[in-house]
Amino acid sequence: MSDPEVLVVLPTLGDRLDTLKITLDSVNEQRKDLGVTLVVVAPPGATAARELAASMGAVIVDDPKEGISAAINYGLAARTTEKYYAWVGDDDLFRPEGLVTLRTVLEATPGAVLAFGGCDYIDPEGRTITVSNAGRLATFLLPWGPDLIPHPGTMITLDALEEIGGFDRELRFAMDLDAFLKLRKHGSFVWTRRSVSAFRWHAESLTVANRLSSSREAESVKRRHLPAILRPVSGLWHRPIRWASAVAAGRVNAQARALR
């Protein structure tokens, strides 16, 4: 196969070896369709995780222990010939042909810098709870509503990502939202409703376990991207959206319990 086209960054602490193996298998599945460079960012002490990733052809980068955004940026620095970036967590998945689907959608629109697809929410056993595939609605809501663009179901042109300076190291939860809002100035967003990824919904997930902190950080990010005249009154819609997001999360939890 020719030079790799997609740089997949996978940060891990190395404490989820069971799901990490499944995630790595899903990345390897993508290699049937296009060239992929997998970069695993892990602490030096995560020996088992690093050995597992290396056995599957991953480039191993030391976790700088400066937060998730810094970890992703260190992964991005491993770029060689790749044109596109994709991210996956150590308990998430790419669906078969997910990355090639995103690349096809992205390359079909000149000037597009970001493509996203549907994302299945799955329980710890891998059963689908619900599906997020908002399409055009996600781009409309992005500046002021909930972020419905799933990071593990997104592909971004690396040149555009480098132009915005990568991910904000000060952010712990909403670094992807911040990057998406910055990228709007560099090109268009395109989408497919086909599920290209899966997000594992469980209590240990960073955004699930810290929902209030995540919501507040997202509100702060959206506020700083608003026109100055609207920032003082942004609470008028941020609070109802926070409530609606909490209700939606409660429904997903109820659906997950029903599968047990």
Image (tube, helix red, strand yellow):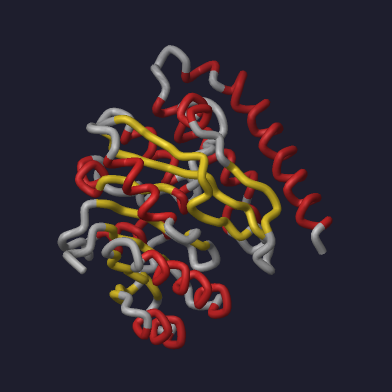
What residue do we see at 51% from left, 74% from top? Answer: 20
Screen quadrant of the C terminus? bottom right
Q: Position of residue 81 (x, y in %)?
A: 16, 60
Q: Position of residue 158 (x, y in %)?
A: 24, 49
Q: Could you say which is closer to the camera, residue 13 or residue 86?
A: 86
Can see residue 89? yes
Q: Could you say which is closer to the camera, residue 63 or residue 189?
A: 189
What residue do we see at 45% from left, 73% from top? Answer: 24
What residue do we see at 39% from left, 79% from top? Answer: 53
Total labels: the figure holds 0
On the picture, is 12 further left or further right than 156?
A: right
Considering every residue shown, the one lying at the far top of the view is 229
Q: Relative to 40, is 72 above or below?
A: above
Can see residue 74? no
Screen quadrant of the N terminus? bottom left
Q: Position of residue 195 (x, y in %)?
A: 53, 49
What residue do we see at 37% from left, 80% from top? Answer: 56
